[in-house]
Amino acid sequence: MKKYISAVFIIMLPAMIWMGCSKDKPVDEDGLLITTRKECAVTSFEMLGTDHLVVHGKTAVIDTTAQTINVTVRFGTDLKKIWPKFGLSQDCKLDPKITTWVDFSDLGTQKTWTVISGDRQVRKTYKVFVTVEQ
Amino acid sequence: MTGKFFRYTTVLAAAVMFASCSDKDYQVPQPKTELQNDAIKRSIGPNMAGLRMEFAYAMAIPAGKGKIVSAQVEASIAGAPATFLEHRSFYTNGSGADIGVVVGDPSENKGNTTSVTFTKDTMAATLRYYYVPADEARGKEVSFKFTARASNGETVSYDLGPYKIANMEMKLDIALADNGAKYISIADMAAYNQADAALHADKIDLVYLHRSIPNITFGHALVAPAADPQYLPGITLPAGVNRDAKLMKTWNLRDQQLARLSQGVFIDDVDFQKLTFGDVADYTLNLAKEYGVWVETADGKYRAYIFINAANSNKTAVISIKRYTMK
């Protein structure tokens, strides 16, 4: 029995020391994994109304070179209460985060969001241009 | 060490085996030999003034002990005149249909009590009780005491509740027409035509309209009279109709009492209390069947949920409203 306890101790101790010293995966201030990916782009964009349905008939036009998003919403859309929904390249994150309804009613002033790459080194700011069906 | 371990394990295993093999004599439950009863609430969702609450009250006595002579329900708050206790006992036939068998005289309401006197020799019955909360019960709690009496003098009772009666009110199936009753009053929970709207101008909160305009999607719409005129094309508002309202469109919020669909979703007082409108529009376009619109009147007195029961291609619609008085 004593032999058994000693054997377990001898195996477990180095294993625990090794695990304790292994390097943690890097995470950012949001607790998200920092990867090696440099891709940094918006891949899809939708605007949802208070009914949680898309408020535009046609797909938003995303220009990843000019870093713009153009979207035409239906006539009568309540632009004061819109929930924008971004699709991003793998491992990217968005700044500022979308945590509540966004007011797009000032059509002359474009809202901006910054996409940050997986390695957190590349930042690209997108402008959202909204027009209303007439 | 090993020897001790095996000795203890053996003793423990033997104890477990002994316990599991011990005989437990099954006793056939003895039926009670007195008058018994039971009650359940059958209706679900918020209880509202004017809306039936349904209960089932079962009672039985062994055949040799006598028969049931009466049943009654006492509510802590008197129900509306439409309250009644069924004088028929129901059973479900092989096709799943509820079949009623008359067991007594139609019920009588006296104050808070509703009673049925049995006229048939009955040893077991299940009576449905429909309590319709009166307006006085709004916002209060109501309890029920179900009582059965047998010919041998036995009496049994069963208490249910308390149940909260909601403050909100409901109006179903208000017909709207683009060329008719299109002016909606939340205060009156009614729709008026052009002439009648002028008589109720200070109570008109919304205008219903349907438009087909090239290049834009307009369709069925609810718009506050004070909204930008571009959302009221072709509408000439009656004199004095100028109120504003906050509107918020929803989809797929099919309140079971408004939609009368078995969704198990109910809007209750608390939903109106906790609703946050913020800075929202005073118009909603592109409405269709099963859309809903949350409304807050200009004076903040009422909040309402309007459910679209039907939105027809002939520029008509049917709506149902739940309304909560905020102040």
Image (cartoon, rainbow, N blue to C red):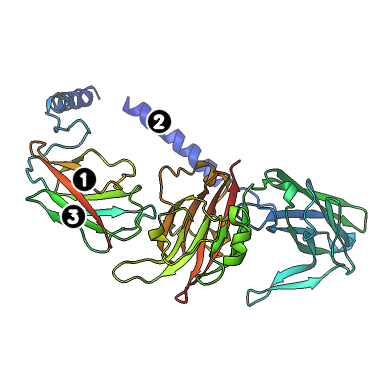
Q: Nearer the viewer, residue A16 or B8?
A: A16
Could you tell me how far apart the alpha carbons at marks 3 and 1 are, in whole angstroms?
A: 10 Å
Chain to which mark 2 belongs: B
Is residue B99 shown to the viewer in this render? yes
Mark 3 residue type: Asn
Q: Which residue is mark 1?
A: A110
Q: Amino acid at mark 2?
A: Arg
Give the spatial CA distance, label 1 vs label 2: 81 Å
The residue pinned by badge 3 equals A70
Q: Residue at x 63, y 56 (%)?
A: B188
Q: Position of residue B23 (x, y in %)?
A: 60, 48
The chain under label 3 reads: A
- In the image, what residue type sits under mark 1? Gln
Could you tell whether B14 is left or right of B35 in the image?
Answer: left
Q: Which corner quadrant of the image does residue B42 belong to?
A: bottom right
Callout 3–callout 1 Cβ contact below 8 Å? no
Is B90 on the left-hand or right-hand side of B274?
Answer: right
